[in-house]
């Protein structure tokens, strides 16, 4: 009998995951990961993890499986929270959920599971695992979940073959309503529970307030760049080769204070990210202002009026060699190779047609259509026929 350790989060998805595995005849163990206990950084008066671990325990009892809480808060602080503060202070936007899966659930947590003699680790992600024999070796594939509204493959875009070998995603073939239905039939307490929002395992956190506790406020100016800013209308130069062209289009616009007009004050450029609209508190414009660039050195936020402002859009991004990650190592590109893919730069985004170009120093992703708010530090993930092949951090 194969043993599976399930990360029980106290939500409906992981509850049904454990239930299905038990029905399939696995020996199931439920573990709740406690990833946060730093009371000096308050998040809200509610204590979501206590409530969640309690729900997880009740589900485990109902299913008749062993249950335990594991405290991973040290590792979580080191690998996720400190990294986030560091990235934000550099004016980049990290994705804690992607990191949490790579560093915590499928690394630290997986090690604990293996020490418990587990053959597999299962999570309640809406994605699927496939496999094929390639050159005589099994190769695992990460596939999109069946529920288009809930496909969570993006969050797992940094997993390795080794991690996938031992992973199970039992609800990947189901839609969210089907999962709730199963939970109801099995009489699980989490059947009607709302989906958790906020950071992976920290619970109900509002990012600016969270960041303000570690990154000091620093008053600076908000500058609006006009829609007809000269750099937007420069005619495109002639390029000697494709790489020069890609380099040109992947380079973001740079602004000086003189390029626009000062319209307000902010409390720290490092609290804002590109594409952000809320929290600027500047009135008197026809359309809403959007952040088009932040300069953490000079502590200036550059904004543009309207969500179609040219400063928000480009169609090429670059990933440096250290940051390229192939789940399908057998498909990794070598210099001068290209690949047609579909890609996304954030979780809820529709897949968009793109071409990958491998060069000596890294990888260019050229989108067919311009993308809004391409932000350094975020992950770009590329797919082919529902399969996530690889990802990288946007540089």
Image (cartoon, grey):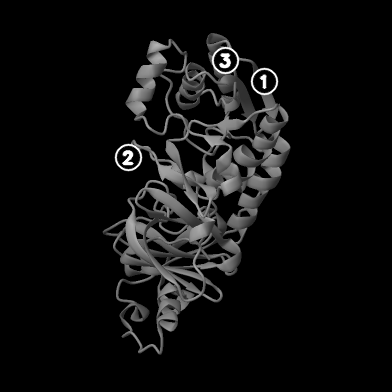
Compared with residue 383, is residue 257 higher up or lower down, i.e. above or below?
A: below
Q: Nearer the viewer, residue 284 or 393?
A: 393
Compared with residue 358, is residue 161 higher up or lower down, i.e. above or below?
A: above
Q: Residue 146 in the image: state x and y as whole percent.
A: 34, 37
Disc 1 target residue = 68
Question: What residue is at 53 percent from the left and 22 percent from the top?
Answer: 10
Assign a secondary structure to mark 2: loop
Quarter placement of the N terminus: top right
Q: Nearer the viewer, residue 209 or 29?
A: 29
CA separation, marks 3 and 1? Answer: 9 Å
Compared with residue 146, is residue 350 higher up or lower down, i.e. above or below?
A: below
In which quadrant of the rendered view does residue 195 lie?
top left
Q: Residue 361 in the image: state x and y as whole percent.
A: 56, 74
Q: Is residue 270 left or right of residue 317?
A: right
Q: Residue 244 in the image: state x and y as whole percent.
A: 44, 83
CA separation, marks 3 and 2? Answer: 29 Å
Task: Please tell me the numbered disc located at residue 148.
Answer: 2
Question: What residue is at 57 percent from the left and 15 percent from the top?
Answer: 60
Can residue 372 be seen? yes
- Which tag, 3 or 1, sits closer to the chain's start? 3
Disc 3 target residue = 60
Q: Is residue 366 left or right of residue 334?
A: left
């Amino acid at each position: 009998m194969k043993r599976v350790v399930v990360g029980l989060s106290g939500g409906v998805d992981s509850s049904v995951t454990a239930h299905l595995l038990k029905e399939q005849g696995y020996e199931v163990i439920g573990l709740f990961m406690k990833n946060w206990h730093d009371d000096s950084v308050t998040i809200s008066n509610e204590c979501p993890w206590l409530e969640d671990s309690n729900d997880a325990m009740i589900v485990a009892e109902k299913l008749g499986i062993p249950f335990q809480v594991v405290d991973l808060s040290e590792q979580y602080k080191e690998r996720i929270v400190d990294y986030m503060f560091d990235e934000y202070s550099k004016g980049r936007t990290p994705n804690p959920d992607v990191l949490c899966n790579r560093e915590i659930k499928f690394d630290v947590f997986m090690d604990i599971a293996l020490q418990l003699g587990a053959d597999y680790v299962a999570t309640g992600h809406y994605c699927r695992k496939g496999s094929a024999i390639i050159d005589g070796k099994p190769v695992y594939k990460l596939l999109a979940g069946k529920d288009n509204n809930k496909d969570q493959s993006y969050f797992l875009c940094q997993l390795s073959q080794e991690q996938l070998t031992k992973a199970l995603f039992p609800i990947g073939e189901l839609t969210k309503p089907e999962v709730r239905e199963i939970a109801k039939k099995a009489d699980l307490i989490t059947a009607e529970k709302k989906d958790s929002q906020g950071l992976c395992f920290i619970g109900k956190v509002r990012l600016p307030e969270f960041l303000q506790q570690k990154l000091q406020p620093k008053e600076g100016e908000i500058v609006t760049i006009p829609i007809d800013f000269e750099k937007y209308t420069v005619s495109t130069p002639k390029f000697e080769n494709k790489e020069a062209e890609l380099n040109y289009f992947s380079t973001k616009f740079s602004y000086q204070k003189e390029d626009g007009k000062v319209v307000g004050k902010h409390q720290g450029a490092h609290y804002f990210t590109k594409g952000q609209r809320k929290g600027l508190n500047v009135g008197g414009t026809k359309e809403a202002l959007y952040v088009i660039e932040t300069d953490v050195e000079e502590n200036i936020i550059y904004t543009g009026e309207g969500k179609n402002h040219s400063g928000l859009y480009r169609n090429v991004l670059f990933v440096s060699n250290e940051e390229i990650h192939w789940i399908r190592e057998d498909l990794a590109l070598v210099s001068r190779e290209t690949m047609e893919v579909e890609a996304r730069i954030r979780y809820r985004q529709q897949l968009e047609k793109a071409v990958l170009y491998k060069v000596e120093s890294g990888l260019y992703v050229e989108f067919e259509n311009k993308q809004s708010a391409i932000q350094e530090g975020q992950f770009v993930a590329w797919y082919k026929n529902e399969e996530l092949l690889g990802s990288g951090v946007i540089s």
